[in-house]
Image: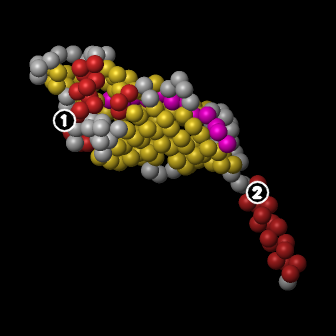
Amino acid sequence: MKLLKSFLLITATAMLTSAGTVVSTYTLSKGYAVGIHGTSNLHDWDENVVTVTGEGSVDWNGDASFDLDALNIKMDVHSIKSTEGSMMDKNTYKALKADDHPEITFALITPVKSIPVGSRTIAAKINLTIAGVTKAIDMSVTSVAAAHGNIEFEGSKTIKMTDFGVKPPVALLGTMRTGDDITIHFETVFTITK
């Protein structure tokens, strides 16, 4: 009986090892690009987010695919810079309640399983938090990965500011009124840290 138990334990351990995963931690590297595009009654406008941080957790599977277990991206609201100048920046900070809620965050809700290496489009469910309001959104994200190496994520999402309690900014003494819809676009590279 002891011999049978030992055999079963060794067999189970071998099976888990051969089918096991390697857990890796990732950090957002420099060279990212995060932008916000919007419209107004006068013309379209663009803003860039200068300061962005992020981290993630990945399980590398035995078949070289990976499971994206966690991904968090934080954008510093006070680092948003507009092509329209400092007045638009100030209106943006005010609309986003930057003093009380200094970050816009993306956080993966549900892990994404068995993503093959190479370039793939994945469906992700994200908690997006703006001005202290969190909404679950669905995103289509392009993933480019080398086995056990860097992982690139690129995606965009159009949202309504009013869904997050944000009043679309106005400028030029009210003559420029921004539209409710904005599109957030990001290009990021995550590098392995351990």
Q: In the displayed structure, would residue 13 be above or below residue 193?
A: below
Q: Disc number at residue 167?
A: 1
User: Residue 50 magenta-drawn?
Assistant: no
Mark 1 or 2, nearer chain start:
2
Q: CA distance from mark 1 to mark 2?
A: 54 Å
Mark 2 surroundings within 10 Å by alpha-carbon count, few (fewer than 14), some (14 through 19), many (20 or more) = few
Which residue type carries mark 2?
Thr
The answer to whether residue 175 is above or below residue 105 is: above
Q: What segment carries the magenta color?
A: 183-194
Picture quadrant where residue 129 is located: top left
Residue that appears at 68% across and 51% down: 21
Tell me if residue 78 can be seen. yes
Residue 187: image location, x then y, percent: 48, 27
Task: Give percent across and percent down for residue 172.
Answer: 15, 18
User: SS of the residue at dot 2?
Assistant: helix
Q: Nearer the viewer, residue 127 or 77?
A: 77
Residue that label 2 marks: 17
Task: State which quarter of the image contains the C terminus.
Answer: top right
Seen from this angle, which residue lies furthest front? Answer: 99
**Going by the image, does 45 lie left or right of 62?**
left
**Observer able to see residue 130:** no
Q: Amino acid at mark 1?
A: Lys
Q: Return the x and y of residue 166 as percentages of the image width and height.
A: 22, 38
Q: Residues within 10 Å of mark 1 (few under 14, many from 20)?
A: some
The residue lying toward the viewer, choosing from 34 and 11, is 34
